[in-house]
Structure formats: structure tokens, C-alpha cells
């Protein structure tokens, strides 16, 4: 288990959490998700849900350890250190610095990144640098992290703006700008996917737009707003009845085929 051990309560400003070393490598710092939930002022169940919904993005024993669904020594460690809340507890997650960074991308708010700056500066890296008497590395690491986090936030904001616009040319330009912020290179993406409105599908299949929406809902084709999936994506469009913009689900070719196939089965 890479000498997994509890090193006691850690304090960074007003943040208090259980310090843990090992699990992801010798002397590597880690954090319990139950502490992360408290730090971000969110229910543990919500943080676990966000992890479970994106579980494939977290690599076992590199980003994440689940004490209750791993090897027996991990479960015993959790039991010995009173980490299991009750018999109904399904997951006791431990995240590495890399795993925590992935979780922050999912949580995606300014508070999350500000907290991450503090934790990286003072918990994940500071001890090692001080022990090795390398204060210049601490400062360099801090500046690097701050620059990376600022670039990530800016790129994410540009992506959200791109997803919110109905102009395809503006969308391409915003996505390209986001790529430039992250990579330093600006490349206008080529839109290969064609999208169809409910009205366009209704016209092609000779049914009402309302019918298209009903079939899509029955099949569960639509992602949660403002997301996207293989069947389509959400976009904002101007309401025909007012100047307000309203969310509209646009269908991919696969979404169109799914509607068409279902229509044949109920015909």
C-alpha cells in the first residue's frame, strides 16, 4: 500500500482535513473525499455522485483509491482509522493531487481553484521543498500552478460562451481562442457534425415538432443542460414569442436515426 498512513490533522488557513501519506507512492500526499466535501461546503453524497458519474476519468491507484472496493489491506486501513461512516457506506474515496485536480475540473468554480492553489502550495508540495531547502522551487511551482489554473478557467469560460452562441462562426472562433489559451496555438476547428432542429426532423419525418420531442424524451436522448452527447447538444435560440433566448436541443445524425427508428416501431 506504499506505506499508507494517517499523519494527523492538517491546517491550511481555516481549512482543516486529515493528512494522509502513501497509497499513490512513497511520501505522496492524498486527501479523503469526505474532507474535500467539507472544504467545498458540499454534501459528501454530492461529491461522490460527481466522481461516480465521471468514474472512468479517474485511474485506480493513480488518481483514486476506493477503500471499500479495493484490496483487503485498503479496507482494513479504513476500518482501523474509522473512515467508514456506517454499514450503508458504499465508497470511501481517497484522491491523489492529480485526482483532486480532475475533480476540480468537474466541480468547476472559482472557489474550487482558489482552494486548490492553497492545498498545492502548502500541502502537496511545500513540505518536500522546505525539507530539501529549495524555496525557489516552491515559488516557481506556485507561479506555474497559478498561471495554469488561470488559463484553464479562461479557456473554460470561452468554451461555455461558445456553447451558448447560436452563431457557428462565433462558436468556432471562441473554441479556437480557448485552444490558444491552453496550448499557445490557435486553430479554427472544422465542424464535421451536422445538427438538426426538432422542426427540421419533424418536416423530414412528416410529424410534429412536439412529437419529435416526446420520442426523444421517451428514449432519453437529451443530455442534462447545458451538456451534449452522441445524440445532440443544447444550444440557445431566440424564442419566436419574445426576445428571450431559450434552450433548444439540436440532434446529431445519430439522434435523427434514433427518432426515425422509434417512429417505425410505433407506426
Image (cartoon, helix red, strand yellow):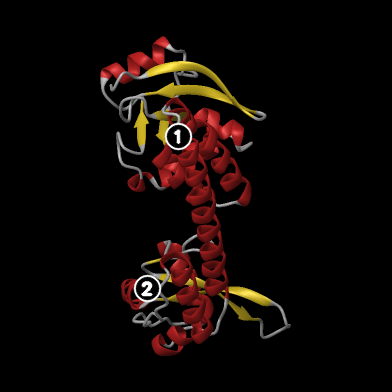
When the figure is inspected, residue 140 is found, relative to residue 9, above or below; the finding is below
**Residue 255 bears which disc, if any?**
2
User: Looking at this view, is 121 or 50 the one in front?
Assistant: 121
The residue at which mark 1 appears reads as 134
User: Is 234 left or right of 56, judged from the image as shown?
Assistant: right
Residue at 47%, 80% in the rendered image: 172
Where residue 2 sits: x, y (%)?
28, 22
Percent position of residue 49, x then y: 48, 41
- Establish if 145 lies above or below 166: above
Residue 91 in view: no
**Mark closer to the chain start, 2 or 1:** 1
Looking at this rendering, what residue extends furthest in the top direction? Answer: 80
Residue that extends furthest to the left in the rendered view of this protein: 71
The structure residue drawn at horizontal position 40% and vertical position 63%, both measured from the top left corner, is 219
Q: CA distance from mark 2 to mark 1?
A: 56 Å
Please say if 21 is above or below 113: above
- Return the mark for residue 30: none
Regarding mark 2 in the picture, which secondary structure is present there? Answer: helix
Q: How many residues crowd around disc 2 within 10 Å: few (fewer than 14), some, or many (20 or more)?
A: many
Q: Position of residue 267 (x, y in %)?
A: 35, 76
Q: Residue at x 45, y 72 (%)?
A: 180
Amino acid at each position: 500500500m506504499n506505506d499508507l498512513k494517517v499523519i494527523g490533522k492538517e491546517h491550511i488557513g481555516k481549512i482543516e482535513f486529515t493528512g494522509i501519506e502513501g497509497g499513490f507512492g512513497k511520501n505522496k500526499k492524498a486527501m479523503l473525499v469526505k474532507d474535500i466535501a467539507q472544504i467545498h461546503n458540499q454534501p459528501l453524497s454530492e461529491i461522490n455522485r460527481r466522481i461516480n458519474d465521471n468514474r472512468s476519468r479517474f485511474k485506480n491507484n493513480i488518481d483514486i483509491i476506493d477503500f471499500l472496493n479495493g484490496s483487503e489491506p485498503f479496507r482494513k486501513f479504513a476500518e482501523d482509522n474509522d473512515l467508514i461512516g456506517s454499514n450503508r457506506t458504499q465508497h470511501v474515496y481517497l484522491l491523489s493531487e492529480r485526482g483532486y485536480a480532475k475533480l476540480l475540473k468537474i466541480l468547476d468554480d472559482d472557489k474550487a481553484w482558489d482552494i486548490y492553489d492553497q492545498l498545492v502550495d502548502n500541502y502537496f508540495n511545500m513540505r518536500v521543498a522546505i525539507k530539501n531547502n529549495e524555496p525557489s522551487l516552491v515559488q516557481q511551482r506556485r507561479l506555474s500552478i497559478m498561471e495554469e489554473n488561470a488559463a484553464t478557467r479562461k479557456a473554460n469560460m470561452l468554451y461555455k460562451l461558445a456553447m451558448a452562441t447560436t452563431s457557428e462562426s462565433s462558436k468556432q472562433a471562441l473554441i479556437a481562442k480557448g485552444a490558444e489559451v491552453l496550448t499557445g496555438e490557435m486553430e479554427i476547428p472544422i465542424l464535421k457534425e451536422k445538427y438538426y432542429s426538432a422542426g427540421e426532423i419533424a418536416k423530414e419525418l412528416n410529424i410534429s415538432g412536439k412529437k419529435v420531442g416526446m420520442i426523444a424524451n421517451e428514449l432519453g436522448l437529451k443530455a442534462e443542460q447545458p451538456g451534449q452527447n452522441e445524440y445532440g447538444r443544447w444550444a440557445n435560440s431566440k424564442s419566436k414569442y419574445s426576445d428571450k433566448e431559450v434552450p433548444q436541443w439540436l440532434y446529431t445524425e445519430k439522434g435523427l436515426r434514433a427518432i426515425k427508428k422509434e417512429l417505425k416501431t410505433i407506426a
